[in-house]
Amino acid sequence: MHFLFFWGIFLLTRDNQKLKQQALQLSEMDDIQVVESKPLLVDRELQGLREAVQQLVVKEHDVETPHGRIHCTMKGTPKGDRPVILTFHDIGLNHKTCWDPLFNHEDMAEIMQHFAVCHIDALGQQEGANTFSTGYEYPSMDQLAETLPLVLKHFGLKSVIGMGIGAGAYVLTRFALDYPNMMEGLMLININPCAAGWMDWAAHKISGWTHAEPDMIITHLFGKEEINQDLVARYRHHIMNDMNQFNLHLFVKAYESRRDLDIERPVPGHNARTLKCPSLLVVGDSSPAVDAVVECNTKLDPTKTTLLKMADCGGMPQVDQPGKLTEAFKYFIQGMGYSK
């Protein structure tokens, strides 16, 4: 299995068009090979792909779980010979506000021709969600992960390629650890494998005295060094005006109560608990999650894991730089053996 290695360097030289036509892969002897990618589609072919993707069947489903109905959106028809892309969003978002900028990007059309996508909205986070009744016990992050096999069963899926960010990345990672045969690969943005520490808890409690929860969520999503302030303003407005505040509070509380994933880098002769599937860890260079993602990288199998630090990018690469993220994801699934 070949995996990308110098993606960080690759994307730092973003204006070099020649490098954009190359994929850096590791051979079995760790020799670096430069592999030329397929020529870019001509405009007419690209337009045809866009139109075909726009016509993909979109079906919404409510999947019954012990914790309530999970809203899922399936775009395209699952193909029996390959997995479905399964997405899970972060706190303060739903599948549309989190993933539409990426999946609506023109470069994603080629991938969408060959993979169906199942978007998951965490319980109570979808558009127009009804408010949970008083006393409703929101599931923990672990319990959210336990609902995913029910989603796969509902759609008749054997395996998926996960795509998650923040809280969603945590849930998908927990799912992959518990059900490794169902997860073929993972793209994890802003993954934090650790439980919220005492300092994090204290900081949230103290800031909560003077700042509303939406401000805390914005800090989680973007940090304090976000360059694109228009993006921050747009998502602040969404969180405050479009999200069900009661339901959102329960989801945030569940994420803040997460436990450590207890993963460790495997060593010969020791059966370590770690991800078995190929994994692409993604973080923007000014994201508040940089340290957490780097920490996660040290705990995973280096032969199956690639760390991508995106230059000139903040806390939401899928919104800020969807074209570059699509390119990285394309090479990732090619490395898994899905060349078309």
Image (tube, rainbow, N blue to C red):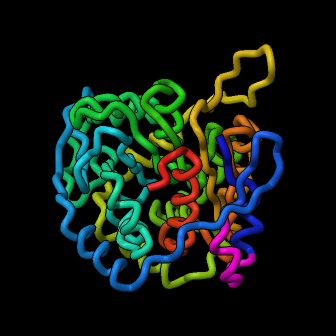
Residue at position x 24%, y 32% in the image = 156
Q: Which range of residues does the magenta coloring cover?
A: 13-22
- Residue 216: horizontal and vertical position, in percent? 53, 61
Q: How many marks?
A: 0
- Magenta segment's dominant SS is loop
Taking the image as shown, residue 331 lies to the left or right of residue 94, namely: right
Quadrant of the rendered image containing residue 22? bottom right
Residue at position x 32%, y 48% in the image = 120
Kindly tell me whether residue 176 is visible in this rendering. Answer: yes
Taking the image as shown, residue 266 lies to the left or right of residue 112, namely: right
Residue at position x 80%, y 55% in the image = 32
Quadrant that contains the C terminus: bottom left
Quadrant of the rendered image containing residue 325? bottom right
Residue closer to the observer: 287 or 207: 287
- Residue 147: horizontal and vertical position, in percent? 33, 31
Taking the image as shown, residue 88 lies to the left or right of residue 302, namely: left
Kindly tell me whether residue 239 is visible in this rendering. Answer: no
- Residue 73: horizontal and vertical position, in percent? 24, 52
Magenta stretch encompasses residue 16? yes
Residue at position x 72%, y 38% in the image = 303
Quadrant that contains the N terminus: top right
Magenta stretch encompasses residue 171? no
Residue closer to the observer: 338 or 256: 338
Taking the image as shown, residue 245 lies to the left or right of residue 222, namely: left
